[in-house]
């Protein structure tokens, strides 16, 4: 009984907090207007919470009353403020107050999001009316539709030869390539060419370093003055991708990270050095950042990337089927050309299963990196032309050589 009472009081407190937060933002943003403020929103949220506790019928009546009051308020003030934000906020406050009875944490979290949206009125209006162009809006909607509408509808199972292909996985790669392009576009518009490429390059590597190499190659081809910064950003993207190997191996066994630390550190050091040298060189400041009319990404580019990955996955599956268990390592190396981290997980499984020793594990890591970095070198030439491709390939292959030297010098 005491626990139930405490939970109920906590829910009512959460509802009151929801109303006070939203009411505070509304009142501060409309100090000169007659609008529902702190007290009104607090009372509405608390009333909705009590109604939800009493029963569904009472809640429906309460929500109808709040909606009626919001309609009356709009009718009385629409000449001065034709927007519906205040009225919708009042109804939303009632809904969140009712939700607090069932899930206080979710209600308060959504209230914070709602308060941020209300507080950022001017910034959001400026973004939608002045900063974003129709082309950017179209590209953004296309990306969202691809990720939130098409992707969930695709089956998450294998099909085709050896059931190696997965439509959802391949389409996810298409979405990732487009997302990387959009990320780079936004970063360049916000912070400029040099720092924008560095920032977007590194963080894009956590999404897909291969997609980043393609995206920055396209950027270098469109604006040759951005060449060195694009190369540096591509190398930083691969550094971020390499760092993901640590949690992948650590999830299997912390000892695997210790065995591979020399190879990973050597490769990472070269990528970092090359990335920093590329970012701080060149004549990038002479080139204006992309405008609102610049395409955020190219859909055909993303489709081509997914097709290449699908081909490599099929090849790896065929080798594994033809050669048998002995082809696991060869299949892992082939698969690394398309997806490095999945192949690194395979390496960890082989090592933990005793199929390979520590030295073989280090050289297999070098082989996986060779397949991955070699593929990216080819893609760099295809996407950005000879100059971009040669420079990216030089940085990637130099890092691979450092990794091979670390594997050769490692004890045991």
Image (cartoon, rainbow, N blue to C red):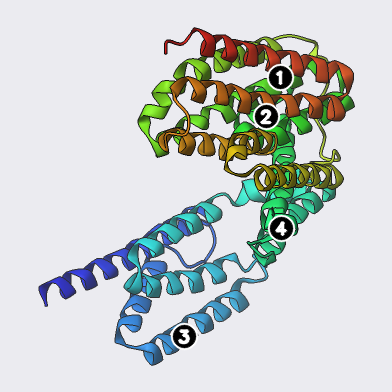
Density class for disc 1 (Cα within 10 Å; few <14, some 14-19, many ≥20) is: many
Q: Earlier in the sequence, mark 3 or mark 2?
A: 3
Number of numbered discs overlaid on the protein picture: 4
Give 214 or 228, whichever is nearer the viewer: 214
Task: Give the vertical position of 409 relative to 112 (above or below).
Answer: above
Q: Earlier in the sequence, mark 4 or mark 2?
A: 4
| Residue 100 screen position, x and y as percent | 35, 69
State the separation of the CA atoms marked 3 and 2: 62 Å
Query: Are circles 3 and 2 on residues that touch, CB within 8 Å?
Result: no
Give 299 or 335, whichever is nearer the viewer: 335
Mark 3 vs mark 4, foreground winner is 4
Q: Which residue is mark 3?
A: 65
Mark 3 vs mark 2, foreground winner is 2
Which dot marks residue 194?
A: 1
Q: Earlier in the sequence, mark 3 or mark 4?
A: 3
Left/right placement of residue 162 relative to residue 103 reads right
Q: Earlier in the sequence, mark 1 or mark 3?
A: 3
Mark 1 vs mark 3, foreground winner is 1
Density class for disc 3 (Cα within 10 Å; few <14, some 14-19, many ≥20) is: few
Q: Which residue is mark 2?
A: 372
Q: Which residue is mark 4?
A: 167
| Residue 149 screen position, x and y as percent | 69, 64
Q: Residue at x 77, y 33 (%)?
A: 215
State the separation of the CA atoms marked 3 and 4: 48 Å
State the separation of the CA atoms marked 1 and 4: 37 Å
Q: Residue at x 49, y 55 (%)?
A: 113
Task: Give the vertical position of 313 relative to 111 (above or below).
Answer: above
Density class for disc 4 (Cα within 10 Å; few <14, some 14-19, many ≥20) is: some
């Amino acid at each position: 009984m005491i626990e139930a009472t405490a939970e109920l009081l906590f829910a009512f407190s959460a509802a009151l907090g929801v109303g006070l937060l939203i009411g505070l933002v509304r009142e501060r943003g409309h100090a000169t207007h007659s609008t529902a403020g702190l007290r009104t929103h607090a009372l509405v949220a608390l009333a909705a919470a009590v109604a939800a506790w009493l029963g569904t019928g009472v809640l429906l009546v309460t929500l109808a009353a709040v909606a009626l009051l919001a309609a009356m308020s709009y009718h009385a003030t629409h000449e001065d403020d034709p927007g519906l934000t205040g009225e919708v906020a009042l109804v939303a406050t009632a809904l969140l107050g009712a939700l607090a009875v069932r899930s206080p944490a979710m209600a308060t979290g959504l209230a914070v999001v709602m308060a941020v949206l209300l507080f950022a009125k001017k910034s959001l209006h400026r973004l939608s009316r002045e900063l974003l162009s129709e082309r950017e809006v179209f590209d953004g909607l296309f990306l969202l539709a691809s990720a939130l509408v098409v992707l969930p509808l695709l089956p998450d199972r294998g099909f085709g030869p050896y059931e190696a292909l997965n439509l959802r996985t391949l389409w996810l790669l298409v979405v990732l390539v487009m997302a990387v392009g959009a990320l780079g576009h936004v970063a360049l518009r916000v912070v400029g060419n040099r720092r924008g490429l560095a920032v977007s390059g590194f963080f894009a590597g956590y999404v897909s370093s291969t997609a980043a190499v393609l995206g920055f190659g396209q950027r270098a081809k469109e604006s040759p003055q951005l060449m060195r910064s694009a190369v540096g950003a591509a190398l930083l993207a691969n550094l971020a991708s390499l760092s993901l190997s640590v949690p992948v191996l650590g999830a299997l066994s912390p000892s695997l990270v210790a065995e591979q630390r020399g190879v990973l550190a050597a490769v990472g050091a070269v990528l970092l050095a090359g990335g920093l040298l590329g970012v701080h060189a060149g004549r990038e400041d002479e080139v204006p950042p992309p405008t609102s009319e610049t395409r955020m990404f190219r859909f055909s580019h993303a489709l081509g990337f997914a097709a290449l990955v699908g081909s490599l996955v099929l090849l790896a599956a065929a080798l594994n089927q033809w050669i048998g268990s002995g082809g696991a390592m060869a299949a892992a190396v082939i698969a690394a050309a398309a997806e490095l981290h999945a192949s690194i997980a395979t390496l960890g499984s082989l090592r933990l299963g005793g199929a390979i020793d520590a030295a073989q594990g280090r050289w297999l890591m070098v082989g996986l990196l060779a397949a991955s970095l070699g593929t990216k070198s080819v893609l760099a030439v295809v996407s950005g032309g000879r100059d971009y491709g040669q420079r990216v390939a030089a940085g990637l292959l130099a890092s691979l050589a450092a990794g091979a030297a670390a594997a050769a010098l490692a004890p045991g």
